[in-house]
Image (cartoon, rainbow, N blue to C red):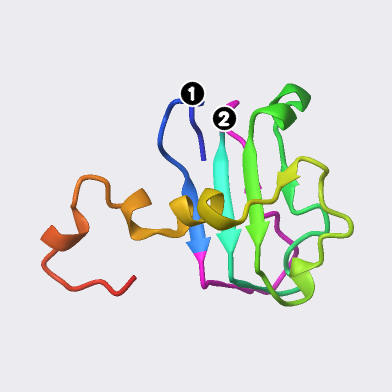
Amino acid sequence: QQRNSSNETTGFVFKNCNFTGTGGKAILGRSLRDYSRVIVANSFLSDVVRPEGWNALYPNQEATVTYVEEGNTGPGANQSQRVKYVKHLSGFALDQFLNISFIDTEGWIGQLPTKIFV
């Protein structure tokens, strides 16, 4: 995920997902720009998730990226070896990203020909 400015209202949100796989380990995200934002919440993380969880491409990005994990379960959700710049949000700060209005600011979901359950 990439954002070129902290003012951009974009980001990836993974809510109620299953992170599984075979054939190796993976990270949850890697920054492409200084203000990358990814939220993983209320999801199952299998042991496919690497212990560090995340990767800032450049050390100076550690202060500006927003990587959030909240309410996850499974062996990959263990945060004891996570990178130190993972953020924790709760209440309104977290809800603003988990609410459908974050990804549907222009009302495009209601215009799809197929109903999507979110």
Residue sticking out furthest to the front: 91
Q: Is residue 34 magenta?
A: yes
Check the image and report above or below for 38 versus 2: below
Q: Are marks 1 and 2 in contact (CB under 8 Å)?
A: yes
The location of residue 111, given as percent across then percent down, is: 11, 59
Q: Main secondary structure of the magenta part?
A: loop
Lower sequence index among marks 1 and 2: 1
Number of numbered discs present?
2
Q: Residue at x 82, y 60 (%)?
A: 79
* 100 sits left or right of 19 in the view: left
Q: How far separated are the C-alphas under marks 1 and 2? A: 6 Å
Q: Is residue 30 above or below residue 82?
A: above
Whether residue 109 is situated above or below residue 60 in the rendered picture = below
Residue 90, visible in the rendered structure? yes
Going by the numbered disc 1, the residue's amino acid type is Asn
Query: Which mark is on residue 35?
Result: 2
How dense is the environment of label 1, judged by Cα within 10 Å: few (below 14), some, or many (20 and up)?
Answer: few
Of the residues shown, which amino acid type is indicated by label 2? Tyr
**Which residue is at 73% across, 64% downward?**
49
Q: Secondary structure at mark 2?
A: loop
Residue 66, how many percent across, how many down?
Answer: 62, 40
- Reading the image, the residue beneath label 1 is 4
Percent of width and height locating residue 82: 82, 52
Range shown magenta: 15-35
Residue 19 forms part of the magenta stretch? yes
Q: Name the one closer to the observer, 20 or 110.
A: 110
- Which residue is at 15% across, 62% downward? 110
